[in-house]
Amino acid sequence: MASNAAVPFWRTAGMTYITYSNICANLVRNCLKEPYKTEALSREKVHFSISKWTNGKPEKPTSDV
Amino acid sequence: MLRRASGLLARPILAARARPFSTDLPAAQTADATFVEAWKKVIPNMDPPKTPLSFMQPRPPTPSSIPSKLTVNFVLPYASELATKEVDMVIVPATTGQMGILPGHVATIAELKPGVLSVHEGSDVTKYFISSGFVFIHANSFADIIAVEAMPLDQIDASLVQKGLADFTQKLSSATTDLEKAEGQIGIDVHSALNSALTG
């Protein structure tokens, strides 16, 4: 296997490629013109709710939209 | 239950395990003939299930002479921009610089940095800005470009780019931890790439 080129700066700072790629994508999306920007941001929205479990029972879920 | 059946049928190990690089593969078969035969021996009354191999279109084999056109697949997570489009040349923003891909290019896998992708067909040039991704060039003059985010240049707002550049330059100078410095640097790289895409 060919030896890799110098390790990219984000890798030495502890970031993974996926995090780097997602940051780049978010920055680019934020620079879009208006109708495209809202489409792109709504396309990437993630809905999830987290519930912690204690003593075998789930507590009330906190939802982050 | 059916999953155990394929183990019991003792499928022979495919030559797949011995392949070194994904860009050098010979043309793949359309149907998994050995699996179908083995299935019919054990379960003759049921139709064999379709394996993923039968859904895939086989990759065209590497022609003996260099083809005249490059076939490009340009895909995003949410859409396929170009699907097996025949073009003359593509220029991609690889991390090692702008890379031109012509028909007959050697098989390569390249990581992309934020930059401009230009597709040249006859005298038309279509440009897209890509946030990051990869390009796989196969020996049979097929190029697969995958990007996380891509858009034509006229959808980019120049004032937001300038503002972002200024913000991140300031963030980098006031950064303390390595992670903040990395984020600042990424911001500067992306925004300067956007800037040169708009002006260049």
Image: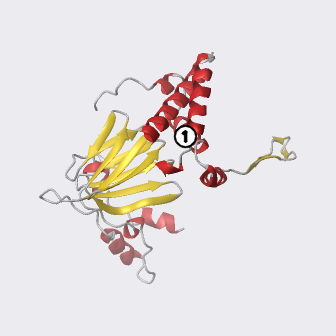
Label 1's element? Answer: helix
Question: Which of B154/B189 is in front?
Answer: B154
What is the crowding at mark 1: few (fewer than 14 residues within 10 Å), some, or many (at least 20)?
Answer: some
| In this picture, residue B97 sits left or right of residue A41 | left
Disc 1: host chain = B
Image-quadrant location for residue A2 = top left
Task: Evaluate whether residue B3 shows in this view.
Answer: yes
- The image shows residue B55 at horizontal and vertical percentages of 40, 69
The residue located at (58%, 46%) in the rendering is: A32
The residue located at (29%, 66%) in the rendering is: B29
Task: Evaluate whether residue B114 shows in this view.
Answer: no
| In this picture, residue A8 sits left or right of residue B18 | right
Extreme residue in the bottom direction: B45
Which quadrant would the N terminus of chain A be assigned to in this image?
top left
Question: Which of B77/B28 is in front?
Answer: B77
| In this picture, residue A57 sits left or right of residue A64 | right
- The image shows residue B170 at horizontal and vertical percentages of 61, 21
Total residue callouts: 1
Q: Is residue B27 above or below residue B151?
A: below
The residue located at (53%, 25%) in the rendering is: B185
Q: Is residue B19 above or below residue B8?
A: above
Image-quadrant location for residue A14 = top right
| In this picture, residue B74 sits left or right of residue B21 | right
Q: How is the image coloured?
A: secondary structure
- The image shows residue B120 at horizontal and vertical percentages of 30, 54
- The image shows residue B5 at horizontal and vertical percentages of 46, 67
Which residue position is annotated with label 1? Answer: B158
Question: Which of B14/B156 is in front?
Answer: B156
The amino acid beneath tag 1 is: Ala
The residue located at (34%, 67%) in the rendering is: B57
Question: Which of B102/A53 is in front?
Answer: B102
